[in-house]
Amino acid sequence: MSDFNSLNVEQLKELKSKLQEEYDKFKSQNVKLDMSRGKPGADQLELSMGLFETEIVKKYLASDGTDCRNYGVLEGIPEMRKLFADIFEISSEEVLIGGNASLSLMFDMVSQAMTHGVVGSDVPWGKLSKVKFLCPSPGYDRHFAICEHFNIEMITVPMKSDGPDMDLVEKLVAEDEYIKGMWCVPKYSNPDGITYSDEVVLRLANMKTKSKDFRIFWDNAYVVHHLYEDESKQDKLMNILKACKEAGNPNRVFMFTSTSKITFPGAGVSAIGASIENINDIKKRFKIQTIGHDKLNQLRHVAFLKNVDNIKEHMKKHAEILRPKFELVLNYFEKELGGKNIARWTKPNGGYFISLYTLKGCAKKVVSKAKEAGVTLTPAGATYPYGNDPDDSNIRIAPSYPPLNELEKAAELLCICIQLVSVEKLLEMKAE
Amino acid sequence: MSDFNSLNVEQLKELKSKLQEEYDKFKSQNVKLDMSRGKPGADQLELSMGLFETEIVKKYLASDGTDCRNYGVLEGIPEMRKLFADIFEISSEEVLIGGNASLSLMFDMVSQAMTHGVVGSDVPWGKLSKVKFLCPSPGYDRHFAICEHFNIEMITVPMKSDGPDMDLVEKLVAEDEYIKGMWCVPKYSNPDGITYSDEVVLRLANMKTKSKDFRIFWDNAYVVHHLYEDESKQDKLMNILKACKEAGNPNRVFMFTSTSKITFPGAGVSAIGASIENINDIKKRFKIQTIGHDKLNQLRHVAFLKNVDNIKEHMKKHAEILRPKFELVLNYFEKELGGKNIARWTKPNGGYFISLYTLKGCAKKVVSKAKEAGVTLTPAGATYPYGNDPDDSNIRIAPSYPPLNELEKAAELLCICIQLVSVEKLLEMKAE
């Protein structure tokens, strides 16, 4: 189809009524679909039923003889630390195991920084007149929610195709001593699905910060979450802890990850990776906050996941389920929106999201129209600090949860809504 | 044996050399025993191996159809909330399920109060010039550690045979607006093993506090942890949430408990009970802090523990293992220390501890002498704020972990040490 921008008012009106008809027809089907969260589908959960196998479940002795049914072991059992160390590509001593989700590790880390500061802080962040975080956007709404909760001012930094706009990042952190942190989803980012380039990682590690206790919150949630087996289609991410050490800023980064989208979300194991000095500082809090995290779950996870090579094999099975879903949506976009000059979208090699950008000022309307017809998307704006997308353009698509047939319906409706709202927008513009 | 106080110097010296000989003999055996923490023994852990049974492990659907392998359910699954509600004797809506240990719930609650305040706070506690907590003592060292971590000033309140000295508590909270909280282990208290009387509970619920956002942290860790089947030897604790509601102070109390000493410590399930208004306030944080706690573990626990009646049956099996250990220690004390007027000790009907009080100024020396001969006890003073027992008299005995034969050795040594240190003390006093 031709570029919508080349259509005249008559043509647009005609198109609008045709699209409205399609929309009404869809709406009358009373479907109810949810594409709002990056939630694995039930068939993905089946891949980890091995966690329930008797020989795995009945284990309770760690490799060092620890009885995992009893108190003790603050850092996590050695074999679990080793496995996450291999995933992070750091040493076991640089890893602490957390509870069932890395989000809590991040929240607690920010909370601790507010009440106690981090290594190198003169005062707890909460004692300062203000605290600011850089928020590459679009980004992960739950990161932004943590900032709002602690009254941390968020500064939106645009995302480029290889990570955050580093010219701006470098300028901001060099000038503003109140910028204490920065959120990053560096691999298969939420929601753009892009991976930070080596240059971006190196600049993050090396940049001069006015604040001496600045921290990067490196949420590597999709570290092994490739969609393609072909290695040329697997994004590589530089090891930021190593880069920070080499830059003389070893304490700059907190790395997070979890097995949430490897095994069972909410019943998995999380981990934090950082310099020994940071780890020791976090352990001081762990000693007070917890009697140690669930070692039986750690043991089950190590027994089931075994090692990084085996995780890669396991993740291929996830990819086999996810890939057709991503491709279905992308093909739909190509077929229905291609060449029309009303939207662009990302084509990620991994992760859980596709990011779609509408014409300016259309995202909210598209999401609301879709909702009205029974398809729930992530609220427009949610991927920006304070829920405010300055262009009102980004829509996060989470294709993982619905089965293929439902996903097709949802993609169909989404494309109708995007076209309809775009046509309305173009008509408005022509009327002005 | 006769009262040591009635012995003359010659007799004391003779006794001392006899005890020193026994001590040296013990020491030469090179034993290594640990009675420092309230940790269940391996035989107690065996009681919950049913948690590993296939039909329990393979469950993943909650009673309301929730797939517990996936994201969701912030409050905990309904059947788990119901079970803890029954334990707390409150309604399900007044319960939130936490992670693997109630200590983290307590830490997080204090942390939230510092950064955000509680229902009714004018400002977050951390914004005040100081915050103080009442600490009935001897008490639980980990409670005191949380206060130290957040720089909360601790005020020691003496324990009486039916709970904290309420005359003092009432006076302090009525006068001092900076007293924001109070720690309580109200049933089979750590370490005295006493249970608060109805009068104490009612006075706590009804007392006037100068601070309008004062909170009682009600750590009901030993709620079903009786040592005796005979109901006349089972302590009863009044429902403080009910009492607080009736007193017009519904938001005054946060109740905590967990399955740590019912099933597996560190791999259990924790819960908080409070007024709906408090629960809603905590949920606001939960929404930001967590994607929900481990629902599979909740499901396993409900499937294994079933209901309160079944928990009572299960706890009888724990009691059968623990009772002989408590009785062994108590009999040893009676036999070796009885009538000598150098120590008194508690005889609890439940919980995990016996509290022993030496002559003033002797506890540290006893613990250090025992350590020297291979028996680790909880450090003297640990049961008081800042590790400071003003009388240097309280020793916390945790008889649960060692097997009976080892426990006997430990009790034997402990009695030698107490007598030896007491004789030295009496000789010192006579020399003055």
Image (cartoon, coloured by chain):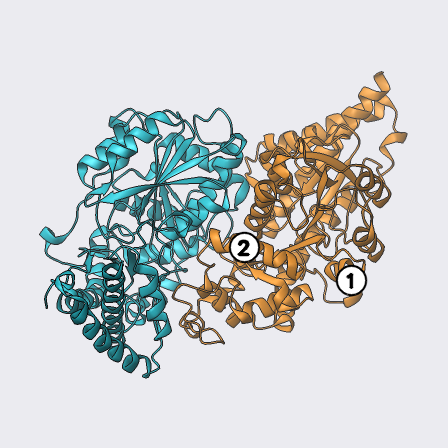
Chain colours: A orange, B cyan
**Residue on which disc 1 sits:** A233
Q: Residues within 10 Å of mark 2 (few under 14, many from 20)?
A: few
**Percent position (x, y) of residue B303?**
32, 57
**Residue on which disc 2 sits:** A284
Q: Are circles 1 and 2 on residues that touch, CB within 8 Å?
A: no
**Percent position (x, y) of residue A145?**
61, 37
**Percent position (x, y) of residue B379?**
37, 60
Q: Quadrant of residue B278?
A: top left
Q: Of the two numbered discs 1 and 2 on the same chain, state the one appearing first in sequence.
A: 1
Secondary structure of the residue carrying numbered label 2: helix
Q: Nearer the viewer, residue B432 or B184?
A: B432
Asked if A90 appears above or below A187 in the picture, the reply is below
Asked if B345 appears above or below B280 in the picture, the reply is below
Q: Residue at x 23, y 36 (%)?
A: B201
Name the chain letter of the residue that bears numbered label 1: A
- Whether residue A9 can be seen here: yes
The quadrant in which the C terminus of chain B is found is bottom left
Q: Amino acid at mark 2?
A: Lys
The quadrant in which the N terminus of chain B is found is bottom left
**Percent position (x, y) of residue A318?**
62, 61
Q: How far is mark 1 from mark 2, CA to CA? A: 42 Å
Q: Nearer the viewer, residue B339 or A211?
A: B339
Can you name the residue that lies furthest to the front here? B432
Name the chain letter of the residue that bears numbered label 2: A
Task: Mark 1 vs mark 2: tell me if same chain.
Answer: yes
Q: Quadrant of residue B191?
A: bottom left
Q: Amino acid at mark 1?
A: Lys
Secondary structure of the residue carrying numbered label 1: helix
**Mark identifier at residue A182:** none
Q: Residue at x 81, y 22 (%)?
A: A427
- Whether residue A138 can be seen here: no
Q: Nearer the viewer, mark 1 or mark 2?
A: 2
